[in-house]
Image (cartoon, coloured by chain):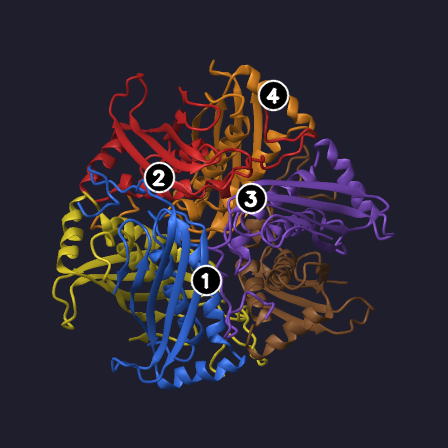
Chain colours: A purple, B brown, C yellow, D blue, E orange, F red
């Protein structure tokens, strides 16, 4: 079966990666949180250090990347060598959607498995932290479009969405 | 400012909830992961206990709800009294979107703050776990539409999306 | 079904305890690790502060009690009010078994659920820590007889084994 | 002294493994939980996906293996490359004991220390999770016979119980 | 003995606080990190949001307060109701010492034990985070003068240093 | 900027160490807690195994070293190969200060980044644990003089304070 996290009896296991080479791995994930323009304005006005929502969310996202193997049951623990998280304010997003904040996380390691789960976890927790900090003003925010943009390294080669 | 997580100097803090009454609080959050029909078929065929993707994701989601205050920097720790997580296979979702799996989390507590962050975290980690288990088959899955459906208890009263 | 951790559809959930009264709860659990007499002698000789195996194991057991809800998926988080861990050297155990070390953990809380899982977890991690510290001398140690001795508080009343 | 976790002054330390080669390490541990036949029947009936006790316990065991160095004070952190956990229903165990469930955990790494503590921790938490899920039906279950079955890799060579 | 964390046999335990009233508790702790004037200038110049050392350290300090009972073996877990962390740049500290950054943490709860350990832990981790972020520029920084300033609530009454 | 934890836009990130060689790294950190002579006498009398404050603090310090990357936001996770923690009773410290306990932590790894943060974290948590265990007797204890004594390995070479 293509579901490699299950053995031939259908039981979940942490897949054996012992025979895989430790190579340089990179993954980039992205997603966004949509909100009212007034909520976005609150975040934007905070960027001058008074109420730095995105600064807090960035730290939460980086710390979450390090916790990925604690959160995702069958994920291998990995010693990450880099985590970077960028936020972009979307006044008028290219796809015609609502305004909001876009989060992009880049994670690297030298290891035996890929790091797309770490990048996705960073994005999700970054967005959740923005939700937490703005929810007193806007409870209808939606976290959306969270996906892997690209992934490099390992036997399966590169993936670009 | 409506951004209550910052004090008057604009510095982040964990808000004082000491004067708030400990009341019964409920929150329901929902989101989905979109995928290829063939990927959904793999999950569906696993529901007969051979490769139970959703069973694993449910446990991950419940455990993540308990870790919320470790992940979200300014979130208060809470002793949850209930966590329930439901998955629904979406062959043809009502909104005309892609097929996939919908995740709904319900969280309750008797406490001084709401539990919508716990419900949202459960949904996000449940979806991430599905991504992890199916990524060997489909790297283009997208986690989307994660939001609070309803929230009850506390001084601010009920919210229904 | 008597398996209360599953709902009527058979899906795991963290049971709703919101309607249960917060009462004083106590649980006592016990177990032992069996070993060669020479290994036990090493532990006994360490009791004079040089190589205090049991002192280290006691701390590990107490800290593990606090981690129970992180380890056991459907366990409710609880604010423990007391944890005590006792060790007894068993030169000639009453039941005629091998010699070893017996561990007894007592845990209390004021809460909505019992604390037998916390007491059992403390015992298991206490025994594991003894195994870890003595394994260079003896790999055939066996952890055995881990059970709940008694449990008080809550609607179901007292249980004594 | 054979108690390598203490220095020459008798003080606990995390042993220096910096000079040891990173080799392929494997360990297998096993233990069982004994229970009433009626309790075992509940677990057995759940194997058809309605109330999947063993599926939940397997995830808990795998996640616990990854937490070993947080639980056991002097244990080195290790990046595990494989964790597999098997359960067997024991209607009439070969040694004439009570009926119950046997848990076997296999752990592998490429590292400087062995992984028997990770395998033992997986077994203990797997058994604890079964206890938690069945305790409403049977409080007299006993976790027993937890030991290392085999261990390979590293300078000390293979151990088979 | 005044060392309440040991029982009459001299064994460590987590003290029984079950009979203590849950009252409002506050603690304030303070400490500082001393450094070269040039290092302090780097931190000061970052306060305009480019390289916000203190913003990162504040989040680390708040999150550490929530982790206190995981770090301090005999500390009771507590549901904190408030955590606030202030930093002050010390160009010429009143006591004639080196220049540096002073950290003050205020923690509150409604609970059965005091929160001075949480306040001290927040200060220590806040200072450690500043060390981490500035160590490429200055390895000779010293963290110093970490103490409890005041503490209120509970049977023993108020303490003011 | 010398503040390497920020990128050119001034945003915090976990620095890319993927291109750095994995070399043997050592760091030694030290600090002390000052207290009343009567408090020190309590600790000293406990050294005969009845109320072993320093034994508990040593375990807390070692376990904290393993948690460093969870506490310090931009710290890389590392697989430590050695942690040793020493305490010295200071009746009359050489610098004429108050009496107290000095803590020295030595940490080693084979990795891509230094381990001074792990050594400093071990010292801080060791001192905090002493504070916790003696605070019923003495609330005016001060943790002070925490710094890196030496650091070896890596491209930047050795540092000795």
To which quarter of the image does residue C129 belong?
A: bottom left
Q: Tell which subunit mark 2 falls on.
A: D
The residue under label 4 is E42
Q: Tell which subunit mark 3 falls on.
A: A
Foreground mark, 4 or 2, reads 2
Mark carried by residue C146: none
- CA separation in Å, label 3 and label 4: 30 Å
- CA separation in Å, label 1 and label 2: 27 Å
What SS does tag 4 mark?
Answer: helix
Q: Residue at x 38, y 75 (%)?
A: C157
For the residue pair E154 and A125, the one nearer the viewer reads as A125
Q: Are marks 3 and 2 in contact (CB under 8 Å)?
A: no
Mark carried by residue D62: 1
To which quarter of the image does residue D61 belong?
A: bottom left
Please give left or right for residue E23 compared with residue A150 in the image: left
The residue under label 2 is D18
Please provide percent x and percent y for residue D127: 38, 69
Residue C79 in sight from this viewpoint: no
- Are discs 1 and 2 both within one chain? yes
Please give left or right for residue B10 compared with residue E78 in the image: right
Please provide percent x and percent y for residue F5: 59, 31
The residue under label 3 is A109
């Amino acid at each position: 079966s293509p579901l490699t996290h299950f053995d031939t009896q259908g039981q979940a296991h942490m897949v054996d990666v012992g025979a895989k080479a430790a190579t340089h791995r990179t993954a980039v994930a992205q997603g966004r949180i949509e909100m009212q323009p007034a909520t976005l304005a609150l975040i934007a006005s905070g960027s001058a250090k008074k109420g730095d929502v995105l600064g807090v969310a960035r730290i939460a996202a980086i710390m979450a990347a390090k916790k990925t193997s604690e959160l995702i049951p069958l994920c291998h623990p990995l010693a990450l060598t880099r985590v970077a998280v960028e936020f972009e304010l979307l006044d008028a997003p290219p796809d015609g959607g609502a305004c909001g904040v876009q989060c992009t996380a880049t994670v690297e390691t030298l290891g035996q498995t890929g790091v797309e789960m770490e990048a996705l976890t960073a994005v999700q927790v970054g967005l959740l932290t923005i939700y937490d900090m703005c929810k007193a003003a806007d409870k209808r925010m939606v976290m959306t479009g969270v996906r892997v943009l690209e992934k490099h390294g390992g036997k399966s080669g590169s993936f670009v969405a």
